[in-house]
Amino acid sequence: MIFYFSGTGNTRWAAKEVAKATNEQLFYIPDVISGDCTFTLQPDERIGFVFPIHGWRPPVLVLKFISKLHIDHSGHYTYALVTAGDSIGLAMDYLSRPLAEKGMHIDSAFSLIMPESYVGLPFMDVDPKEREKRKKQKAAADLQRYISVIDKREKGVNELIFGPLPGFFSGPVGSFFVKHLITDKPFHVDSDKCIGCGTCEKVCPVDDISLIDYQEKKVPEWNHNGECLTCFSCYHHCPVKAIEYGHRTKHKGQYFFKL
């Protein structure tokens, strides 16, 4: 049983690869979090948590899901697989704490370095195409090695890229990220560029976008429902780059996972 979240597709690819190799069922967290989050495992099922790193921490949606999770985990192998553009800091600590409150612990943990998709800070942009290609190639090889560990239920394996000053980035910087950078307020659309395709509404994982009438087409409007993750899925998937995040995404690239 694999619980996963993905915005721009890096993690979806990884989760599907693991599910295919281990014959485990996939659950997309945005699809199940509105329910009672009660799950029943088969005797030999593993429990996997697969998600991207947001601000050197697990996404708030993942932590919210774990707080609601009800599952008989006794005797079941549990692992975490995370994706990041460069490093994960102490994100596993921030995952382990709410799991411990449920009586759960991670047997093995892995990080995959994938193409960068966070563009919400002035100094951050998507990777150049050649670096994107190299990251994907290495991630594919690393993932096969991780899958072997997961399939064999090996414990105590921790292949994680913490990066420099992990406590600082997951601590003070991560706290600033959660308090000030996870917001939909800066998102806006250039109504003249928008073609009214509705892609942004479809890809938003938390239903924070609605289409409204504008002249003879429909354009996106953010609902400000308090659920936005700043995953930038709407920005990256827009086929005409009509969506911006304040002035921070001007002249920046777009990325979503494609083989």
Image (cartoon, rainbow, N blue to C red):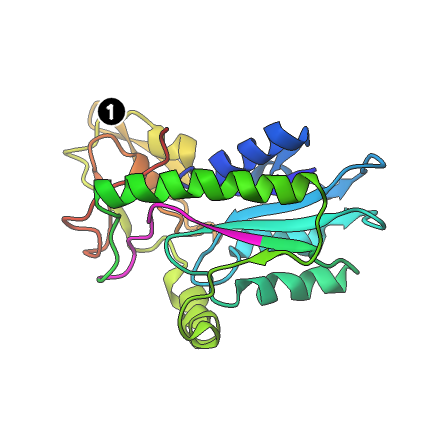
The one of 88 and 140 positioned closer to us in this rendering: 140
- Which element carries disc 1, helix, strand or loop? strand
Question: Which image quadrant is residue 115 in?
Answer: top left
User: What residue is at 41 percent from the left and 59 percent from the top?
Assistant: 182
The one of 97 and 13 positioned closer to us in this rendering: 13
Q: Is residue 117 left or right of residue 239?
A: right
Residue 177: % across, % down: 41, 66
Question: Which image quadrant is residue 63 in?
Answer: bottom right
The one of 169 and 198 positioned closer to us in this rendering: 169
Q: Main secondary structure of the magenta part?
A: loop
Task: For label 1, count other residues whose C-alpha is less than 10 Å away and answer few (under 14), some (14-19) or many (20+).
Answer: few
Amino acid type of disc 1? Answer: Lys
Residue 123: % across, % down: 22, 62
- Quarter holding the N terminus is top right
User: What residue is at 66 percent from the left and 32 percent from the top?
Assistant: 22
> Which residue matches tag 1?
217
Residue range corresponding to the magenta coloring: 110-122
Is residue 121 covered in magenta?
yes
Residue 46: % across, % down: 73, 41
Q: Is residue 152 left or right of residue 116?
A: right
User: What residue is at 60 percent from the left and 28 percent from the top?
Assistant: 20
Residue 135: % across, % down: 35, 44
Is residue 187 covered in magenta?
no
